Amino acid sequence: MRSLLAFTSLIARPATFLWGALAVIVVTIAVVGVQEPDVPVLIASDYALLVCFGYPFVAGTLAGMALREFQSSSFAWTLPGVRSRTALGFLACALTLSMVVVALTLSGDVTQNLVLLTGFGTASFYLGAVSVHPASRWLGFASSLLALLVVFESGHMARLIDTYLLTSVSLTAVLTGLCMQQLFGLSVFRGMPSIPTSPMAGAFSLNASLRMERLKLVTATHTHVDELPAGFDHSIWSWVRAAAYESYGPQPVKVALRSISRLGLLFCLIVLHTLLEPRSVPLLEMIGKITYDALFRPPYLAAIGDRPPYVAVSLWIAAMGAGIVFATPLALRSKLLYPLARRQRSQIAHRASLALGATFAVLMAASFLIVGHLAGWLADYPLRMDFIPFFVRPLLGTLILLPSAQYAAVLSLTSNFTKQYGAAFLLIMGMTAFVTVVLAWSFLLPSVLTLTEMVLSAALLIASQFVYRRALEKRYTQADLV
Amino acid sequence: MNYAIEFAGLTKRFEQVAVLDDVTLTIGKSSLVGLLGRNGSGKTTLLRHVVGQLLPTAGIAETLGRTTSDLRRDEFERIGFVPQEIRLLDWMTVSQHISYVRGFYKRWDSERESRLLDELELDGNMQVGALSTGDVQKLAVVLAVCHHPELLILDEPVSNLDPIARSLMLEFLLEVTREDDATIVISSHVLRDVERIVDWVVCLNHGRVMTDEALDELKERYAEWHVTKQDGKLPASFTESFVVEQEVNGREARVIVRSDGADAESFRAAYSCELVVRALNLEQLFPVLIGGDQA
């Protein structure tokens, strides 16, 4: 029992875990509600697989963050039996959670295979942990992709499992074994305290000590504003340039391109979706058709396939938005003393947010337009510009909500831990609200953006920026800055 | 097994840089060893090898009789470690953190824990993330000593403590040595404090061991001469072979000499000067020690 406590105590910090779980259930209901569940198949129905895999995966990401934080601490390595004890506790958490979720799922559908679904749930807990752990990037990438496949292609995946049961179980077992090895390997425990933690802001990594590590990492490679290129005239925009220099180094374009490269995962998902769809045309043409439809959803074409990946595109844009705010924020360092009045700091923070939002919007729109048109060319569609592409609505929604995430990021820089966890909660709830609203917006209204919508969106954009600016002013003039 | 720590030809390279270079060193059981050296001399790297966190590029490293790459639960039950850069779980309270760490050890001295918390004025209800740097350091020491370690590794354990806390901490470390018969290796730049508790000194410079000797012997080996000349000036420098360091300023000079070769009477006669002999403390000895003068 004492062994099990070694890990379970780490994730017993209740607030975020419970809030996160709550949020995930809401997301799940929203997603499942939009996507009609398939007819249950023999082994694992669409709905059961989605919940039994998806929920432990998200819980696993929280567990992975907790594990990462623990392994990064300087005292963990010398604790006796630390590897076996945390591994046991981790397994106990995975099994318990999976069994609970499976039990809840089974209440609605008695045809499920309890053991199989528990196994998938346990595996997904490990996959979730690996996806946020720096142990293996490739395994993290593979687990994220698999999770996306199950969430967005649960119908196909359920049928695949049903058809290739033994292969699916074997692959899952191998993948779980690899995850175990990566998470609890000797070299991981030995090396983690020396590795600066990932800049990714998660519930457990928002604390000050880890944030300092990230600052050290940045400091190690970039120097202070003294080394800015010529043209620094102490204007607000010059300070924004200084912030860009301090945040991304001398080549901010590289950071932007790296962000865009994450879209690769979305396109991997679309390609895999295409492979799973029944098709009568050549593969490349089908990839083109589905990509074009997923990004543009033109009013003159019928939807391609059983379930076009509109949800994935919407969610992806929101995730990318949250990513740039928390993973690659554009800000002056909070603990350095700059020759700036508090009001100036707030103006700089707002302009930097504006610049980041604008860069995000331009990069996303440009990359979606380019990829969409390339896909259209592959599908042999005529080039038409007389409609508003599908991705515009989620992008607009993200831009409207971006200031709230940016404000949460500002709060997390100076707030105590409880408030930081509050910020994480707000982020999760914000994403949930976003997905629900954007999906309703996209599917309930006509596929072409109306004039009213455009005016309303513009008004909301301006209003959100105005509120954000006032909030920043209040924060910077009335609160502690460190 | 007579040694707590044994290194033979230990070399550690990061990329092409040798941070430890052919270190051969043994630390006997129940010793109180001060590990000294300038910044970047390799002290922290050496201590990380002791607990097996770093592995040698070449050579042998053994702790409590086992190769450090293969340290197991049994050995870690007997080791206490306070790292230089302390990263704890900030979201826990002090009490939660202690009870969390306690769970890993078979034996835990709750009496020592509460006494230390009391003496070091640590509030169990405080969140670790809200503690001052000094208090985090105190907590790290509490976490490292309550399981009665046989080997206590302390990397800069008092650097952020105020003088009163530092004094308390040092007294406590002496008490640990007495009570547990523990081997303590302490790395610190506060040499006056180290001097109070250690009986052996190891000095590193550029990853090499320059000094590995008992503190008393070192103190006996060197002396400081305060030289004054009433009429005329002293020479710009002294060329005697026993002079290790010198600072000549007109009619006055401060000279560090090796006691075994130095003849004060002859020196006094040769330069027609007055000479006062003083014992050196560790801080004054330090420049000599990192120079490796052990002839």
Image (cartoon, rainbow, N blue to C red):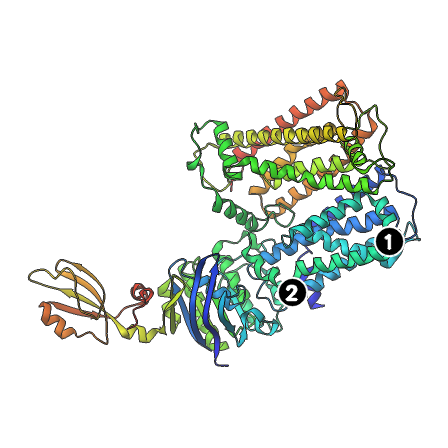
Q: Quadrant of residue A187?
A: bottom right
Say which of B222 and A448 sits in front.
A448
> Please, is residue A421 above or below residue A114 in the view?
above
- Badge 2 element: helix
Q: Quadrant of residue A300?
A: top right
Residue A109 lies, in percent from the top left, at: 92, 50
Residue A296 lies, in percent from the top left, at: 76, 28
The residue that appears at 42% across and 37% down in the rendered structure is A227
- Badge 1 element: loop
Locate the N terminus of chain A by quadrant: bottom right
What amino acid is at disc 1? Tyr
Say which of A453 and B60 sits in front.
B60
What amino acid is at disc 2? Arg
Residue lying farthest front? Answer: A282
Residue with the mark numbered 2: A83
Q: Is residue A58 visible?
A: yes
Residue with the mark numbered 1: A164
Q: Viewer-nearest of labels 2 and 1?
A: 1
Chain of the residue where label 1 is placed in the rendered structure: A
2 or 1: tag closer to the N-terminus: 2
The residue that appears at 67% across and 63% down in the rendered structure is A86
